[in-house]
Amino acid sequence: MTKQTTNQPKTKNEKWLLAAMIISMCTWGISWSSAKILGTYTSALNLSFLRFVLVPLTLLPLTYFANIKRSVSKKGWFHVVGASVFILLYTLFFFKGVHEGFPGAGGVLVTTINPIIAYIIGLFISKLLPKKQEYIGLALGFIAGMVLLKVWNNTSVILEPGNVYFLLAAFVWAVMSKISSHANKFGNAIGFSLWTHIFTAFILLFFVNYNELIELFRTADSKFWLNILYFGVINSALATTCFLYVTARIGAEKASTYIFIVPSTAVLASWIFIGETILWNTIVGGALGILAVFVINGKFKILSSNK
C-alpha cells in the first residue's frame, strides 16, 4: 500500500516530463521554418546574437516572478562556460552547414545521429550500456534518418561537405547536453540555461555587425518580429530551457532520443508555413523516428523479457 502511494507522484511526474519534452521537440521542429524566413533578413551571426540576447531577457523576469534561483555554485561555472562554448560551436557548425550544404538533409542528419552520439558519449563517460530495448530504439531512429534522407538514391549525401558540418553540430550538441545533464548539481537547470545564454551572448558581442543590426531594426516588418520572437523566446528560451531541465532529470542519453521527433515536425511545419511538398519517405521516416522515442523510453514494449 505504502509502496503504491510513493510510486504515483513519480509516474505522474514522468508523464509531465514526457509531455513537456514532446512539445519542446515540436517547437524545435517548427523553428526550422522560422529560421528559413529569418535568414532572408540578415546574417546568421546577427540572428544568433539576437537569439542569445532574447533568451536571458525572457528568463530573467520568468525566474524573478516564479521565484526561481538564478545562482550557480562555484564548481558549476566550469560547466556553464563549457555548455556556452558548445552551444556557440553548434550554432556556427549549423549555419556553416546550411551555407555549404543542404539544410533539409543536414537537419535530418543532426537530429537522427545526435541521440546515437549521446549514447556513445554516455557509454564512455558514464560507463552505461544501453538495454536491448534501447538498442532497438536507436536502430529504429537510425533507419528513420536513412529513410528521410533516401540514402538508396544517393549514398554520397551523408559525406557531402555541408553535411560534415552537420555531423560536427550533432557531436557538439550531444556533448553540450551531457554537460547540461549535471545542471541540478550546481543550482537548477533554468538558472544554468540563463547564465549559459548570457555568456554566449557576451562572446558574440565581439563578432556582430552592428551597422547591419541597426539597419535591420529600421526596416524589419511584422513578419520578422513574429519570427524572431518565436525563435528567440518560445523556441530558444522556453523549449531549450525545458530540454535542459528534463535532461538534468532523466540524463543526456534518454533526453537526446526525443530529438528523433524533430525531423517530421520540421517537414510538417515547412509544408504548412512554406508550402514544401511532403513525400512518402517523410511520413514513413517521421513515424519511425517517433516510434524510436517511445521504444527507447519503454513506452512501447518490443521485448517480452523484463530485462
Image: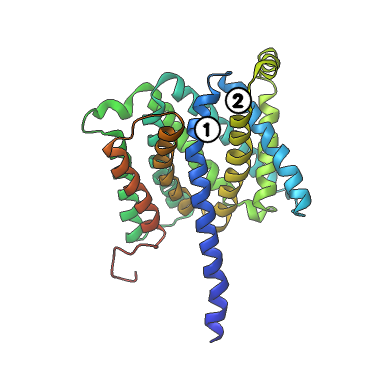
Residue at 45% across, 55% down: 127
SS type, badge 2: helix
| Whole-percent x, y for residue 12 in the image | 54, 68
Q: Quadrant of the C terminus?
A: bottom left
- Image quadrant where residue 159 sits: top left
Amino acid at dot 2 = Phe
The number of numbered discs placed on residues in the rendered structure image is 2
**Left or right, residue 199 beside residue 142:** right
The tag earlier along the polypeptide, 1 or 2, is 1
State whether residue 301 is above or below residue 186: below
Q: Is residue 123 left or right of residue 81?
A: left
User: At which x and y percent is residue 216?
Assistant: 66, 17
**Three-letter code for the amino acid on which mark 1 is drawn:** Tyr
Up the image or down, 291 lies above or below 87; here it is below
Residue toward you, 248 or 105: 105
Residue at 53% in and 87% down: 1
Q: Quadrant of the rendered structure where residue 196 is?
A: top right
Q: Is residue 116 above or below residue 88?
A: below
Q: Is residue 195 above or below residue 39?
A: below
Q: Which residue is mark 2?
A: 224
- Residue matched to label 1: 90
Identify the mark at residue 280; answer none if there is no mark.
Answer: none
Judged left or right of residue 131, residue 21 is: right
Q: Nearer the viewer, residue 298 or 274?
A: 274
Specify whether residue 130 is in view.
Answer: no
- Horizontal relation, residue 142 to residue 94: left or right: left
Q: CA distance from mark 1 to mark 2?
A: 23 Å
Q: Residues within 10 Å of mark 1 (few under 14, many from 20)?
A: many
In the image as oriented, which residue stretches furthest toward the left? 152
Tell me the mark number nearer the camera, choosing from 1 and 2.
2
